[in-house]
Every structure is written in structure tokens, then in C-alpha cells.
Image (spheres, rainbow, N blue to C red):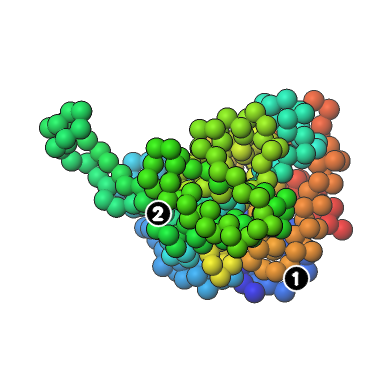
Amino acid sequence: MKIAVLPGDGIGTEIVAEAVKVLQVLDLQFEMEQALVGGAAYEAHGHPLPDSTLKLAKEADAVLFGAVGDWKYDKLDRPLRPEQAILGLRKNLGLFANFRPAICYEQLVGASSLKPELIAGLDILIIRELTGDIYFGQPRGRRTAVDGHFPGAEEAFDTMRYSRPEIERIAHVAFQAARKRGKKLTSVDKANVLETFQFWKDVVTEVHKDYPDVALEHMYVDNAAMQLVKAPKKFDVVVTGNMFGDILSDEAAMLTGSIGMLPSASLNSASQGLYEPSHGSAPDIAGKGVANPLATILSAAMMLRFSLNQPEAADRIETAVKQVLASGLRTADIWSEGATRVGTREMGDAVVKALG
Ligand code: NAD
């Protein structure tokens, strides 16, 4: 098995180094090969996703990704910006299913802005369709309006669209994930207003016939946004389109109080996947050795479970992370009175130690 390791920019290099350290002590049979991506690749090769990096990612069974981006690249032409590397990897590897768990660890209940009783024990999974919807739909652009409220005015437009196979495949992934968890799936749409999401709702309902053991509910996205802060534990698995999923998964992430704790996985139909923390490259703290590496370490655990068929090793990492938190060690982002503040490297070392 081969893992492509793409640390990227900012804190990416610091947190990926810790995840690699954790993977190395597991004594499993896999090869890891590192390559540049994002701003680092742009500096070295003039492109955020050089052919050599893309080739490595395609050949690998899984990609362990740090983060890309820095404000200094904001003035570059869009295709050369670091963030384009992620879009390029998603497209070229066909990564259509994004898994974002939001788990509230017992020891970190106080980090949430919600009341402890609302989030203690929270364990939900948001599955976001990643390659369709208004983010990719054509046509799009700017033009002079010929109708609407202001004919003759300059306007911009995007196209929301989903095909039946796109909805069917993400629905199957979501029902299968729900089947392995609490057997409850919430499909989020805006069927009351959007034709695309009435179609989404109809197709998800049809796919449900293959999964009679899973309870399906449909919820409008505005209600889902409210329910996530009102009673988040009512959810088990949530499936939705690209744009709604983008927003809801960030909302769910913040329920737990720390973006530094949240892993993610993006998978294709061959279970090849890209695993990365839910946060970005955090230029404000890059190079200071204070970033929380746990989201990346937990992403490595997801990689072992979903792409490398090593569920026991994944369990071991997750247990080690819980032990480290129980021992009172905290990076600055999750620190609270009475806990021991540690840096990126000490946190990685502590997980390695807990793995025995
Ligand atoms: P960000 O997630 O990088 O940072 C938001 C805040 O959270 C910052 O205050 C940061 O210090 C903090 N933070 C993030 N990760 C942390 C960690 N592991 N430990 C401790 N604190 C952490 O989001 P941003 O500031 O909006 O974006 C910064 C750059 O990252 C931008 O260039 C953006 O485009 C890019 N970005 C990349 C990805 C990705 O690579 N997948 C995702 C989001 C943003």
C-alpha cells in the first residue's frame, strides 16, 4: 500500500509531520512518499498541483493532506492559487463523497459555545457531495442582464444542477454509512424552492428502497441549520449537496468548539481517498509550533479505516487521542484552566507514547 503525503503550506507541514510520526510507530506495511502541493508547489514548480504530485496521488491508495493557502497568494490568477490544488485533486481522483464527522470529546465539552448537555456525547457524520452542484455547474459567468429586475445591468450567475447518477451514488454511500452507525439518515434539501433539490429528494427516496433498515428523514436546509444548534444529537448521518454541505459541515464542526480536532475524508468509488483536517493552513500561527495536530492524526485514522483496510489500527489511534486528552494535555486552541499546554510536537509525541 502506498500513501501520498502532501503537507502543503502554513501549519500543513507541522501537523502532517506529527501524523506521519504516528503512522510510523504502527508498524504496518505501507510506503509513504512526500510531494509539494499548494503555495509550496507554486514556488518550486510554478503550479499548485504539479504533474508529478498529481501522478503520485493517482498512484497511491490514499493521500494524506495537510492544508494549502496563504494570504500572499490571494492576488494570483485563480488557476494558480494554492486552493486550486484541492479542487484539482478532487476532480482528477473523482472524490465525490466528503465525510466530516463532528465528535465532541468528553474532555472538551467546555470548548463548545453550546450548553454542555446539548453536545456531550455528540457523534454525527455529515456527508457532503463534493463534485457537483452550483460550485461546478455550467454555464456561469458575468454578462449584461436581458431580463430580471434590472434589464441592461451587469449581472453574475451560476448554475445549480445534479444528475440522477450523481445523487444515487452519494445516497448509496450515505445509506451504507448510516447502516454501520445509528441507522438514521437525514437528507437535507431545499425542495420547497429549488427544482434541483426536489429532484434530489425524489432520487434519495427511491434509493431508500434498497435500505429498509435505515430510517430516512428529509429536512430543509434552513431547518437543518437551526436543528444543528438546537438539538444536534438528534442527527446521526446527514447527507446533502455540495453547497449546503459546505456550510452545514462547518457549522457542525464548530459545535465541538475546536476546528483543530476535526478530521475529514473524501472518497471515490474505489475507496481511494484524500484525508485532511477540516481546517486551513492557519498562516496566523504557522511556524510557531503551536498548531493542534490532532485533526490530522485523526484523519490518518480515517485513512486507515476507509482506504487501507486497517480498522484496528484506526481504533488504536482514536483511543490514543482520547487517552492523551484524558491526561490533560492541550494545544492552545483547546486549552482551558487546569490543563497542561503543549505545542504541536509534544502533542504528537504524546499520541505516539499512548500507542505504546
Ligand atoms: P484556517 O482554518 O486556516 O484558520 C482559522 C482559524 O483557526 C485561525 O485563527 C487559525 O489559527 C485557527 N486554526 C486552524 N487550524 C488550527 C489548528 N490545527 N490548531 C490551532 N488553531 C487552528 O482558515 P482561514 O484563516 O480562513 O484560512 C487560512 C488559509 O487556509 C487561506 O489561504 C485559506 O484559503 C486556506 N484554507 C485551506 C483549506 C485546505 O487546505 N483544505 C481549507 C480552508 C482554508
**Where is 200 relative to 228, above or below?**
below
Residue drawn at (55%, 40%), measured in percent from left and top? 219
Residue 49: percent from the left, percent from the top? Answer: 42, 60
**Is label 2's Cβ within 8 Å of ligand 1?**
no
Instruction: State the mark number for residue 28.
Output: 1
Judged left or right of residue 89, residue 21 is right
Residue 271: percent from the left, percent from the top? Answer: 59, 67
Of badges 1 and 2, nearer the viewer stands 2
Q: Amino acid at mark 1?
A: Leu
Q: Nearer the viewer, residue 54 or 234?
A: 234
Q: Is residue 185 visible?
A: yes
**Where is 41 relative to 245, above or below?**
below
Q: Secondary structure at mark 2?
A: loop
- Other-residue count near label 2 (Cα within 10 Å), few / some / many at <14 / 14–19 / ≥20: some
Q: Amino acid at mark 2?
A: Tyr
Q: Nearer the viewer, residue 206 or 241?
A: 206
Residue 158: percent from the left, percent from the top? Answer: 31, 44
Judged left or right of residue 149, residue 186 is right
Query: Gap in Å between the C-alphas at discs 1 and 2?
Result: 40 Å
Quadrant in which residue 41 is drawn: bottom left
Q: Nearer the viewer, residue 203 or 266?
A: 203
Residue topped by disc 2: 162
Residues under numbered marks 1 and 2 in contact, where contact means CB atoms less than 8 Å apart: no
Residue drawn at (73%, 25%), measured in percent from left and top? 115
- Other-residue count near label 1 (Cα within 10 Å), few / some / many at <14 / 14–19 / ≥20: few
Residue drawn at (78%, 48%), measured in percent from left and top? 321
Q: Secondary structure at mark 1?
A: loop
**Where is 83 relative to 150, above or below?**
below
Residue drawn at (80%, 36%), measured in percent from left and top? 107
| Mark sitting earlier along the chain (1/2) | 1
Quadrant of the snapshot with the C terminus: bottom right
